[in-house]
Amino acid sequence: MITRFAPSLTGYLHLGHVLHMLYVWGIARKRGAKVLFRIEDHDRSRARPEYETAVFQTLEWLGFFPDLGISSAAEKPSEFRQSDGSEYYQSVLDHLENRGLVYGCQCSRKQIAETQPEGAGELLYSGTCAEKGLPLEGNTVRFRTPGRQTGFEDLKLGRQCQIPWLQCGDFSLRDRQGQWTYQFACVCDDIRHGVDLVIRGEDILFSTARQIQLFETLDAAPPQYYHHPLICDETGRKLSKRQRSESITQLRESGLSPEAVIGRALHQSGLSPSDTPFTAEQAIHEYII
Ligand code: GLU
């Protein structure tokens, strides 16, 4: 069995990622899975080399050692770094295009937003360009999302049912600038890396049925899923790199030990009643397995 630790490179890692690592390595241990390390830097406008260097340092400093995948920032190109994967993603896209399952869309985000009802959350694309025959190049590439409901048995949350077609409509696989999207790159990589167990935060639960539909369309068996709880701030919002939550790199530079950082992540998540320091190994045994 293979699971993965696959951070996006949109900022430095924070305490939420430490909790995530505990779940990934802990559940992997429990189920006898190997942990593969992949860099999800598909968003070239936000990824920075210093973030990648920091991810390697943080993993090692905290004591999380992957079994498979990318082993150093010097590994270039790597099949475990999304910015190196364009040729492969293009070949998968060509396959979908030959089957008539994608189309080019020229609607801007603003235009789509204008069609949404008041107070709507996620943008729901209504398929304006679906039959226009626009080229894929230079346009957003959208997947013809099946109209059906997709269900799965989450290992933590139990039975889940989602209808992507009603949540987001035909979602995008590549943007107008030619950047691959998270949904597409993630599924293509989970297929080529043989990932059969996905452990991730509840914040991306809504992505899962979309990804299962892509797996099925590509004739690949979807992995099993385990969605874990998150660390939230005082206002109840999840910690986020974009909101500049305190990074592990900063905590380390301020003199905290790796054990103190792990203890703080456990405490802030509510798993531990105090911020007693723990090694990764102890924390996994005490709170995850
Ligand atoms: N790269 C994603 C993130 O850092 C996680 C990918 C996934 O678990 O599917 O949020």
Image (spheres, helix red, strand yellow):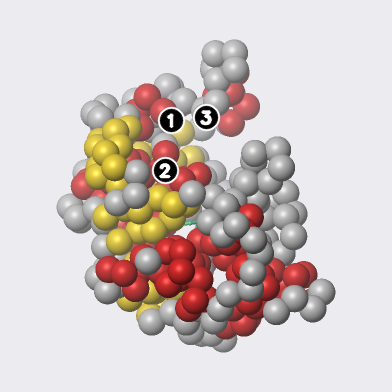
Spatial CA distance of label 2 from label 1 is: 14 Å
User: Crowding at label 1, few (<14), some or many (≥20) Cα neighbours within 10 Å?
Assistant: some
Between marks 3 and 1, how big is the CA–CA gap?
A: 7 Å
The residue where tag 3 is placed is 122
State the residue at coordinates (48%, 78%).
Answer: 281
**Comes first in the chain, label 3 or label 1:** 3
Name the secondary structure under disc 1: loop
In the rendered image, the quadrant that contains the C terminus is bottom left
Secondary structure under tag 3 reads loop
Q: Judge whether 216 appears above or below 145 on screen.
A: below
Frontmost residue, 263 versus 254? 263
Q: Label 2 belongs to which residue?
A: 205
Q: Residue at x 65, y 50 (%)?
A: 239
Contact (Cβ within 8 Å) of mark 3 with mark 2: no
Residue 117 vertical position relative to residue 217 in the rendered view, above or below: above
Amino acid type for the residue under numbered disc 1: Cys
Q: Which is more foreground, mark 3 or mark 2?
A: 2
Going by the picture, which residue comes out furthest to the front? 273
Q: Amino acid at mark 2?
A: Leu
Residue receiving disc 1: 168
Could you tell me which residue is drawn at 42 percent across and 64 percent down?
A: 288
Q: Nearer the viewer, residue 227 or 268?
A: 268
